[in-house]
Image (cartoon, helix red, strand yellow):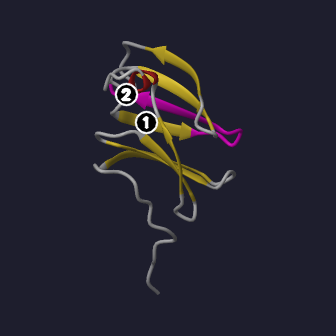
Amino acid sequence: DFATPRAVLTGHDYEITCAAICAELGLVISGSKEGPCLVHSMNGDLLRTLEGPERLQGAESCLRPKLIQASREGHCVIYYENGLFCVFSVNGRLQATMETDDKIR
């Protein structure tokens, strides 16, 4: 038996640095080295882009996501390289942010 991919996710221009799968909602959330986080369906359809607050204001500091976690309630927490946490709704709306100087792993 050979393993075959269920879907091919497209949309990132750079290597993937983090990803989370939320099977309850049928979503895959991924972040790339020099780009925003993307939300795909389990079938591979690109649903939306999650833009951090600085990115919306023109700065580039939310381009490097390091960690992603999704909940079955429809929340996505992203930790960026610059020490910023962002919480998004499943619809891509930014709900909260928090900065930290601590090293997060």
Position of residue 60 in the picture relative to residue 36 (left or right): left
Circle 1: residue type: Leu
Q: Between residue 34 and residue 68, name the one nearer to us.
A: 34
The image quarter containing residue 55 is: top left
Q: Which residues are magenta?
A: 70-81
Q: Is residue 37 above or below residue 27?
A: above
Residue that appears at 46% across and 22% down = 53
Q: How many marks?
A: 2
Q: Which residue is mark 1?
A: 67
Q: Which residue is mark 2?
A: 62
Q: Position of residue 94 (x, y in %)?
A: 57, 27
Q: Is residue 78 magenta?
A: yes
Q: Position of residue 90 (x, y in %)?
A: 63, 40
| Foreground label between 2 and 1 | 2
Q: How many residues crowd mark 1 within 10 Å: few (<14), some (14–19), many (20+)?
A: some
Q: Is residue 23 above or below residue 51?
A: below
